[in-house]
Image (cartoon, grey):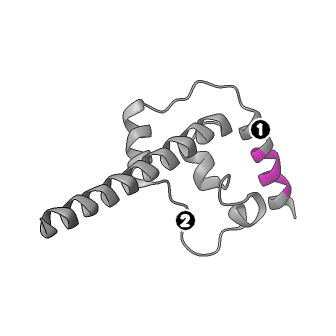
Amino acid sequence: MIFREEELELLEVWQSADVDWDISIDELVELVKTGATTCPGTCLSRDYCGSNACACIRERFPSGKCYEVYTYLREYYLKHIDEKINHDIFIRAIQREA
């Protein structure tokens, strides 16, 4: 039970942190491209705090605000990659029929 309480306290501090990002733009871009992963298997931190705020995520991102920016950029990146792939497939299909 102590671990759960500590995790929830750390989560609260992380969510309300107003700190320098301590993450470079290059690191952020790489995470946006590859995606931030959590540890495999069972993770009590993930069970208590959720997959978007577990210890793995809190260690990578200095604050909840930084993680929010990452998730926005990741969704934007994936959407546009998907659109680009679909566009390329469409163009190739048209070129084959021509």
Could you give the CA–CA distance between mark 1 and mark 2, rounded to whole angstroms? 21 Å
Secondary element at image label 2 = loop
Callout 2 environment at 10 Å: few (<14), some (14 to 19), or many (20+)? few
Labelled disc at residue 87:
none
The image shows residue 8 at horizontal and vertical percentages of: 81, 51
Percent x, y of residue 14: 71, 39
Give the answer, above or below, for where 88 lies relative to 73. Answer: below
Q: Which residues are magenta?
A: 5-11
Mark earlier in primary sequence (1, 2): 1
Circle 1 — which element? Answer: helix
The question of residue 31 being in magenta is answered with no
Identity, as a three-letter code, of the amino acid under mark 1: Val
Q: Nearer the viewer, residue 20 or 91?
A: 91
Residue occupying the far front of the picture: 98
Along the viewing direction, whichever of 85 and 47 lies nearer the viewer: 85
- Split into 4 quadrants, where in the image is the N terminus? bottom right
Q: Amino acid at mark 2?
A: Cys
Residue 87 picture quarter: bottom left
Task: Tell me the residue that label 1 is attached to.
Answer: 13
Horizontal placement of 38 versus 64: left or right? left
- Camera-side residue: 21 or 68? 68
Residue where numbered disc 2 is placed: 39
- State the image coordinates of residue 15 (x, y, percent, origin top left): 74, 39
Residue 94, placed above or below residue 31: below
Label the magenta part by its dominant secondary structure.
Answer: helix
